[in-house]
Amino acid sequence: MESYDNVVKPWCSCILLSLLLLFVSSPSCSADPETHYHEFVVQATPVKRLCKTHNTITVNGQFPGPTLEVRNGDTLVIRVINRARYNVTIHWHGVRQLRTAWADGPEYVTQCPIQPGGSYTYRFTIQDQEGTLWWHAHSSWLRATVYGALIIYPRLGSSYPFTKPKRETPVLLGEWWDDNPIDVIRRATRTGAAPNVSDAYTINGQPGDLYNCSSQDTVIIPVDSGETNLLRVINAALNQELFLAIGNHQLTVVAADASYKKPFTTSVLMLGPGQTTDVLITANQPPGRYYIAARAYQSAQGAAFDNTTTTAILEYKSAPCPKKGLTLQPVFPSLPAYNDTTTATAFAAKFRSPSKVDIPTDIDENLFFTVGLGLFNCPPGFSQSRCQGPNGTRFTASMNNVSLVLPSSFSILQAYQQGVPGVYTTDFPPVPPVQFDYTGNVSRALWQPISGTKLYKLKYGSKVQLVLQDTSIVTAENHPIHIHGYDFYIIAEGFGNFNPQTDTAKFNLVDPPMRNTVAVPVNGWAVIRFVADNPGVWLMHCHLDVHITWGLAMAFLVENGEGELQSLQSPPADLPPC
Ligand SMILES: *[C@@H]1O[C@H](CO)[C@@H](O)[C@H](O)[C@H]1NC(C)=O
Ligand SMILES: *[C@@H]1O[C@H](CO)[C@@H](O)[C@H](O)[C@H]1NC(C)=O
Ligand SMILES: *[C@@H]1O[C@H](CO)[C@@H](O)[C@H](O)[C@H]1NC(C)=O
Ligand SMILES: *[C@@H]1O[C@H](CO)[C@@H](O)[C@H](O)[C@H]1NC(C)=O
Ligand SMILES: *[C@@H]1O[C@H](CO)[C@@H](O)[C@H](O)[C@H]1NC(C)=O
Ligand SMILES: *[C@@H]1O[C@H](CO)[C@@H](O)[C@H](O)[C@H]1NC(C)=O
Ligand SMILES: *[C@@H]1O[C@H](CO)[C@@H](O)[C@H](O)[C@H]1NC(C)=O
Ligand SMILES: *[C@@H]1O[C@H](CO)[C@@H](O)[C@H](O)[C@H]1NC(C)=O
Ligand SMILES: [Cu+2]
């Protein structure tokens, strides 16, 4: 494979380059699908960023973690060994996991966590997905540092639906705390206040030139004049939607969330956490150095956020070497304002499937879920110190007024499969229990949700339409909503309250984009459709980890269909106990 040979050789001998080394297992060349075996050792590793060394939780001592490269149709067998002091699970973000829900990973949903000293082997097959996905920890806030790319090439004999790029480079956007991220969220959970925001964003693990003690290690992505390369951009940040742009270069989007898209050209990308975007970039500018820069898209008004900017450098190999003592300042791109919802919206509206697709019609389940924040009044017996949210409350979040509480003695999937009572109920409301002006001035009496472990049951094969409606409770915000085990079509998005009488006119039932994460517009809504063809328990949640911590999640329980091929497999023998 050609990928990554680009990142290990210094091109400009007069510049000391610090290079990103990605350790990669190349697929070999047999025509049949392959099985790839990997060992992931979760362990504390000293990592120095922003002038300070932290004992960072990593996989195999690498930050970001190892890149997995497979072909469509291949099987992955990954033994995860936990040598850290925290419980951990790994989620293979966007992988459909057909019949293999046991390998999906969210803790207490499809498995109990792998406890320190324990191990668990994830086995799953990639079926009809191509492009860029990623993997990350799905336990507390460990995914702040435990993540990596999962690249899916076309089957042998098959090719990209676009000109073969000369080189391919993953661009992982991350978020760094000058602190232990687990301590940050534990403190916030104790006090009920919002957790501290991050201190830096990163590109392939490095903050870049604009931060203290970082410019030596800025990531360089080399390019030859005239060539067209593929960047696989992944938003792995914990809590922040991000804009990304490259000085003087246009980007052509060709895929997102491991499905191809009708190509379109743009100067800026917006990705919510969980989303991936594959772009072609042609080196058609004067040989030189150009910044790749990313910073926040912050839709919530008045909330604290990390307003720093991370950079890497796109460097033409023929760029003139700077004279001794002089630096060649890279060209900086223009980035939208932090609150530029217009740009975020215009970008989202450009996504289409490559051609006409088969959209589910004759809907069996017409669902309407509100998504948003809330405040719990201080519960009786709680001390003031545990109610440090606004006006002596605790922050929370919910879907349809239910704030998800995870069980602790079983995973939901185990409880379902073994018929254990009392772990969950299946009365998640299909529509909001109270109708109100979701995006208006919401009465304070509606701000406090209930807590529960409520699932929504779907018959195998049912055709689902789901309206996701943001609320302005506490603050309106763009929420990146991710569904495990499924891709879905985004058939419309809009602002204000979804109106079933008039907004159906906006439905794209021809070529809507398929994704696994939809950025629901701030003070607005998105409508998605999918067929419930994958049995199991599937978490749906906001991919801002602070919101999932507060309960902005629910789960679908999809029943088995007929026969083995429509039924969940048996649990693996090494499934961790609670
Ligand atoms: C937030 O960060 C500040 C320093 O920047 C630190 O003093 C404080 O303890 C942190 N608070 C929490 C809740 O993590
Ligand atoms: C960078 O270091 C300087 C000097 O120590 C300090 O004044 C400044 O606050 C630091 N900037 C950041 C963003 O930490
Ligand atoms: C970032 O926010 C801080 C205050 O939190 C402010 O002082 C600073 O000017 C802001 N920087 C930018 C680039 O907006
Ligand atoms: C965005 O922020 C700018 C300045 O920070 C402000 O003037 C403007 O009104 C804001 N726009 C929106 C749509 O909130
Ligand atoms: C907190 O209380 C103040 C004063 O009563 C009020 O103005 C403010 O809106 C309240 N904030 C929230 C989030 O309830
Ligand atoms: C929102 O409604 C409350 C009463 O329910 C009122 O006190 C407040 O002024 C309203 N705020 C706005 C911005 O209209
Ligand atoms: C949520 O449920 C609680 C408890 O029943 C209620 O007080 C609150 O008004 C509800 N809010 C909404 C938005 O339904
Ligand atoms: C780790 O997982 C075990 C099993 O579910 C649980 O009993 C324990 O409380 C967990 N530890 C933490 C720190 O969450
Ligand atoms: Cu959210």
Image (spheres, rainbow, N blue to C red):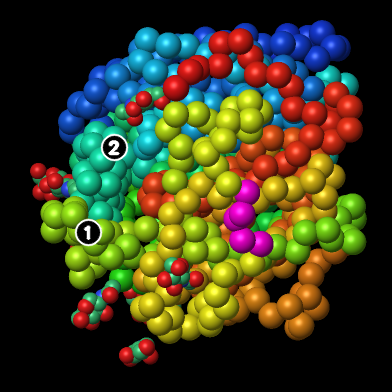
Is residue 429 inside the magenta stretch?
yes
In primary-sequence order, the first of circles 1 and 2 is: 2
User: Magenta residues, as a range?
Assistant: 426-430
Q: Position of residue 242 (x, y in %)?
A: 46, 53
Query: Above or below — where is 267 with respect to 516?
Result: below
Work out how far the residue at label 1 is from the one at label 2, CA to CA, in angstroms.
Answer: 29 Å
Q: Quadrant of the N terminus?
A: top right
Q: Horizontally, is 93 left or right of 125 in the view?
A: left
Please name the amino acid that badge 2 sits on: Pro
Q: Position of residue 46 (x, y in %)?
A: 25, 20
Residue ID at (37%, 58%): 396
According to the image, label 2 marks what residue?
181
Give the dominant element type of the magenta stretch: helix, strand or loop: loop
For label 1, count other residues whose C-alpha is less than 10 Å away and answer few (under 14), some (14-19) or many (20+): few
Is residue 7 inside the magenta stretch?
no
Query: Above or below — where is 41 with respect to 384?
Result: above
Query: Above or below — where is 407 with respect to 431?
Result: above
Which secondary structure lies at badge 2? helix
Q: Position of residue 287 (x, y in %)?
A: 52, 41
State the residue in front, 155 or 427: 427
